[in-house]
Amino acid sequence: MSKELLEGPTIPLTFAQIAERLGIEVASAKARARRGKWRRVPGNDGRTLVHVPVEILPEYHEGPLVELPPKAKPGSELPEATDHTLQLLNELEKKHAAQIEALKQENAATQGQLRQDHSAELERLTQAHQAEIQRLMTVIEKMQDKPSWWQRFLGRRVGSKG
């Protein structure tokens, strides 16, 4: 992934900060930055700052966070907490199922539009290429009727002998 393809918010961090936030060694953070082709900038203090995409960092999340029920005392409120968790999971499943279905429909519509666009573009290019082939065929026919430079130099005509 090149620098131009890195879109979205990033956070400049040192390798030590990356390692701390991801729970890995500094050498691993350097390797991950190299593999991810994250942009590197020299910092004012001499340390290298790496622009890390926020979706890599565990503390950044998109969308609302689900509130879990308070911790239950051992054995006392466990069934209630489990029921609440199941209810939350069912709600999320319904919400995401509807979103997935909407995205599938949008994807199908987009693919249909792309097919139409590509077929129109293919037809236009085919016609342009056929016109160019016809033009080149005309040029070739004219060249075949015209004697070459050495035939003109010797005063010969195409097809004449001697």
Image (tube, rainbow, N blue to C red):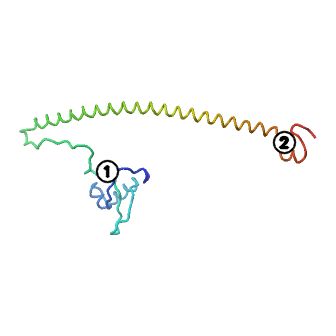
Kindly give the residue lying farthest to the bottom in the view shown: 45
Instruction: Estimate the x, y position of residue 73 in percent, counting from the top left.
Output: 7, 43
Q: Residue at x 10, y 35 (%)?
A: 80
Pick whichever, 161 or 143, lies toward us.
Answer: 143
Indicate left or right for 136 with 120 as reference.
Answer: right
Pick whichever, 24 or 9, lies toward us.
Answer: 9
Q: Would you name the residue on which mark 1 appears?
A: 56
Instruction: Estimate the x, y position of residue 150 in percent, counting from the top left.
Output: 86, 47
Q: Is residue 106 above or below residue 21?
A: above
Indicate left or right for 122 with 89 as reference.
Answer: right
Q: Is residue 51 above or below residue 66?
A: below
Residue type highlighted by circle 2: Pro
Mark pair 2, 1: CA separation: 71 Å
Q: Residue at x 77, y 36 (%)?
A: 141
In the rendering, which numbered label is found on residue 147?
Answer: 2
Pick whichever, 41 or 19, lies toward us.
Answer: 41
Dot 1: what SS?
helix
- Local crowd at mark 2 within 10 Å, few (<14), some, or many (≥20)? some
Residue type highlighted by circle 1: Ile
Q: Residue at x 38, y 55 (%)?
A: 38
